[in-house]
Image (cartoon, rainbow, N blue to C red):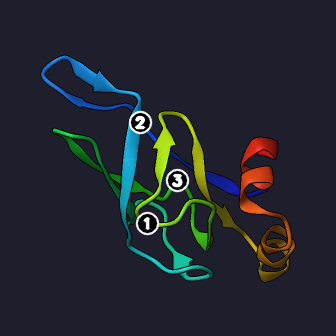
Amino acid sequence: MAAKVVIPVVGKRGKKYDIVKLVEWKAKEADQVEKGRVVLSVETEKASCDIEAEDSGLLHILVDEGGKAMVGAVVGLITQTKEELEAFQKIPPEKLAQQV
């Protein structure tokens, strides 16, 4: 089962934002990532946040850098095997994000 890369609540001083911009993926598609490693940086108008991998495995990116996503949205997956990654890569990202 793949681990999800999910957009967290981002905000400072009591102000929370619902939509964030994906600034930089710290790993590329299919790269091996380790649990606890920063895999993505996101920002709002006034706040930024780094997102860490919840598990170790192979990264599958669903939303590209520069894209926007809602808090709680799945923007990437971390698969355990190359076969699982390849299966996910065959599904359009927007459809896959709704299924997981």
Q: What is the three-letter code of the residue carrying label 1?
A: Glu
Q: Residues within 10 Å of mark 2 (few under 14, many from 20)?
A: some
Q: Which mark is residue 65?
A: 1
Q: CA distance from mark 1 to mark 2?
A: 14 Å
Single out the mark in the foreground, 3 or 1. Answer: 1
* Secondary structure of the residue carrying numbered label 1: loop
Q: Which residue is mark 3?
A: 54
Establish if 47 lies above or below 12.
Answer: below
Q: What is the three-letter code of the residue carrying label 2?
A: Ile
Q: CA distance from mark 3 to mark 1?
A: 20 Å
Q: Position of residue 44 (x, y in %)?
A: 27, 41
Between residues 84 and 11, which one lies in front from this camera angle? 11
Q: Which mark is residue 19?
A: 2
Q: Position of residue 69 (x, y in %)?
A: 50, 44
Q: Position of residue 9 (x, y in %)?
A: 38, 31
Q: Earlier in the sequence, mark 3 or mark 2?
A: 2
Q: Earlier in the sequence, mark 1 or mark 2?
A: 2
Establish if 32 lies above or below 63.
Answer: below
